Amino acid sequence: MAEYVVPASKRRRGRPRAGQSDARERILTAAMDEFGELGYDGATMRGIAARAGVDAALVHHYFGTKADLFGEAVGAPMRPDLALPEILAGPTDEIGARIVRYLLVTWEDPDVRRRGVALLRTAIGNKLTTPLLAGFLSRELLSRIVGTLQVEDADLRASLVASQVAGLIVARYVLRLPGLAEASVDELVGRVGPTLQRYLFG
């Protein structure tokens, strides 16, 4: 019996076709080229698809959103942008503490810590990765925090939060400063959380 072949018009849009087994890797390579040349904001899923020689729907099939693709391309060990809605949904007077707890609890996972430290060591001072991470955090994280603040200096407040948590992560897990590296998560939540709360709402 002859094998039935599904007509191209009936294939699900965006699904990989025969001969596209390497499409995922080509998309990742194209993504880093696109992000590197145009920055996080300037890069588009359609542009990445064109570089990879695939349909834009295939990029969405494999990676979902631009943030998902970026996270995969740079090997991000965590996605704070995905956790942020839940963090912001709780009591307003506990947001600072919840941000600190989420970050520290996540980084206490050995695999997250290993990959996160490697990414930070690579990114800090790197002319390609540093602006990419900054663009990602600005678009996917800080802008969402800013959206919850009904104040004129929301951008500054959100950036202060980012600077505080970035310093905390680097000092505890990369530099491993004495005292800070040995402190418990609860102690750091209690000490740093109020600072973030003041930046946001003080």
Image (tube, rainbow, N blue to C red):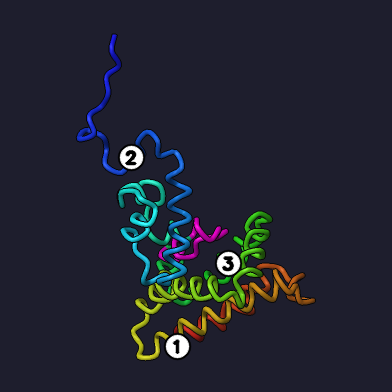
How far apart are the alpha carbons under marks 3 and 2? 35 Å
Q: Nearer the viewer, residue 175 or 132?
A: 132
* Residue located 69% across and 76% down the image: 171
Asked if the stretch drawn in magenta spans residue 93, the answer is: no
Circle 3 residue: 103
* Amino acid type, residue under disc 2 in the picture: Arg
**Which mark's residue is nearer the viewer, 3 or 2?**
2
* Residue located 48% across and 83% down the image: 159
* Residue located 37% across and 81% down the image: 149
- Residue 98, given in percent of the width and then of the height, sits at 53, 69
- The label number, if any, that marks residue 156 in the structure image: 1
- Residue 39, given in percent of the width and then of the height, sits at 42, 72
* Amino acid type, residue under disc 3 in the picture: Leu
Sequence-first tag of 3 and 2 = 2
Instruction: Please state the extent of the stretch shown in magenta in the rendering.
Output: 71-85
Label 2: how many residues lie within 10 Å, few (<14), some (14-19) or many (20+)? some
